[in-house]
Image: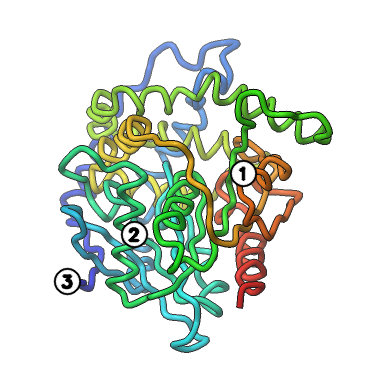
């Protein structure tokens, strides 16, 4: 059953948030001389955001904007899944396109690409199980693979026999898994994040210097992953208690990533957009279940699957790890589209929506 959905946060929850923000216990020793952002989000930045959150940010305005979009929920495999479903102005024969977000993102990431993409596509934009408006999951096992299967069922339930998929961050892995499981239904996959590493013993002679630099950077990232990855893949619940109890803690945990993973020339991300994203985690209490995705997926990690459908990649220069085209072509023989942009980072749909939307339209346009 698919049920229409409308966001209507009780005023008591907003009053509680205001009260908690007013009673924030700030560390007395910060700022610490000589300690920059490599120690974590700086207190000056965080206090400014928290003050604006308490005194200037208008949740009801952003709630109303989200409610202008058609929203639904449905139960799949024991989980509630919330999703946006926007029909294309091009008519009933438009290609359906599923947009898959990651962590610490949400459906909010895609707000600026909905209008241009809906000119050509029916858009399905789920909140990942355990994230935001989907609410928490209530059992273990919700890995990326299980989410891919749930998304396949969602598209089938919506009556879409064939469709495309676009994703970054965890959405990248989910998109590739979805294509591997449903090659007769997924017509193509477009990614804006695709780390590439050579298999052990692979020959790298002949690769351009830029590719070798990208491989070295990716190896360094894998060898020493960011702290959020270590904690969320090992003790997500211990972290979850803190983030569920402290709005400033939740704000810091997400703000750090939006500050670090974006193009320096495009920072900071609009504070209203950032806070609306944070609100979807705070109001739904999904810090623990969203963090669980790391533990479940790392425990359930299997050998990477090939992509049996046409694959397109958009490379944004300030992403966490940049792919080698040569390695991508070796790993994915179906690579048919590659674009290198001169700006943008990990949150491409927010940072450079016109570039991402244009590249998605170009890629799927080739498949028509």
Asked if the residue at tag 2 contacts the one at tag 3, i.e. Cβ–Cβ closer than 8 Å, the answer is no
Q: Which residue is mark 2?
A: 151
Q: Quadrant of residue 338?
A: bottom right
Q: Is residue 92 left or right of residue 299?
A: right
Seen at 61% across and 49% down, the residue is: 332
Q: Is residue 110 above or below residue 204?
A: below
Question: Quadrant location of the C terminus?
Answer: bottom right
Which one is nearer the viewer's eye here, 141 or 116?
141
Quick one: 189 or 69, which is closer to the camera?
189
Specify whether 157 is left or right of 312: left
Q: Give the Cα distance between marks 1 and 3.
A: 39 Å
Q: Is residue 111 above or below residue 44?
A: below
N-terminal-most mark, 1 or 3? 3
In this orientation, which residue lies closer to the viewer: 290 or 65?
290
Residues 62 and 197: in front is 197
Is disc 1 surrounded by few (<14), some (14 to 19) or many (20+) residues within 10 Å?
Answer: some
Earlier-in-chain disc, 3 versus 2: 3
Percent of width and height locating residue 50:
40, 37
Residue marked by disc 3: 1
Residue that carries the numbered disc 1 in the rendered image:
331
* Residue at x 21% of width, y 65% of height: 74
Which of the two discs, 1 and 2, labels the residue nearer the N terminus?
A: 2
């Amino acid at each position: 059953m698919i049920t229409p959905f409308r966001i209507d946060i009780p005023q008591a929850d907003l009053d509680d948030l205001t009260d908690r923000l007013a009673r924030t216990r700030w560390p007395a020793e910060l700022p610490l001389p000589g300690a920059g952002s490599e120690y974590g989000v700086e207190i000056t930045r965080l206090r400014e955001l928290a003050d604006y959150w308490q005194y200037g940010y208008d949740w009801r305005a952003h709630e109303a904007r989200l409610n202008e979009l058609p929203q639904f929920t449905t139960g799949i495999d024991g989980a509630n899944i919330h999703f946006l479903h926007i029909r294309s102005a091009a008519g009933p024969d438009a290609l359906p396109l599923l947009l898959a977000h990651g962590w610490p993102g949400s459906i909010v990431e895609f707000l600026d690409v909905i209008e241009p993409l809906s000119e050509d596509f029916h858009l399905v934009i789920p909140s990942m199980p355990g994230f935001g408006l989907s609410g928490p999951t209530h059992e273990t096992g919700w890995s990326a693979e299980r989410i891919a299967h749930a998304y396949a069922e969602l598209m089938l339930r919506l009556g879409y026999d064939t469709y495309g998929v676009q994703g970054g961050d965890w959405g990248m892995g989910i998109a590739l898994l979805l294509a591997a499981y449903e090659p007769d239904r997924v017509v193509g996959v477009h990614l804006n994040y695709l780390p590439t590493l050579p298999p052990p013993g692979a020959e790298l002679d002949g690769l351009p210097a830029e590719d070798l630099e990208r491989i070295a950077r990716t190896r360094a990232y894998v060898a020493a992953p960011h702290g959020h990855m270590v904690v969320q893949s090992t003790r997500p619940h211990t972290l979850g208690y803190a983030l569920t109890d402290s709005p400033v803690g939740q704000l810091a945990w997400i703000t750090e990533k939006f500050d670090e993973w974006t193009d320096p020339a495009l920072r900071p991300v609009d504070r209203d957009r950032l806070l609306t994203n944070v609100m979807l985690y705070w109001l739904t209490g999904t810090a623990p279940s969203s963090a669980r995705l790391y533990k479940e997926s790392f425990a359930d990690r299997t050998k990477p699957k090939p992509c049996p459908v046409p694959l397109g990649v958009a490379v944004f220069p300030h992403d966490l790890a940049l792919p080698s085209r040569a390695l991508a072509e070796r790993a994915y023989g179906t690579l048919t589209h590659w674009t290198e942009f001169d700006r943008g980072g990990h949150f491409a749909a927010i940072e450079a929506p016109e570039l991402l939307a244009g590249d998605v339209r170009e890629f799927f346009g080739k498949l028509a």
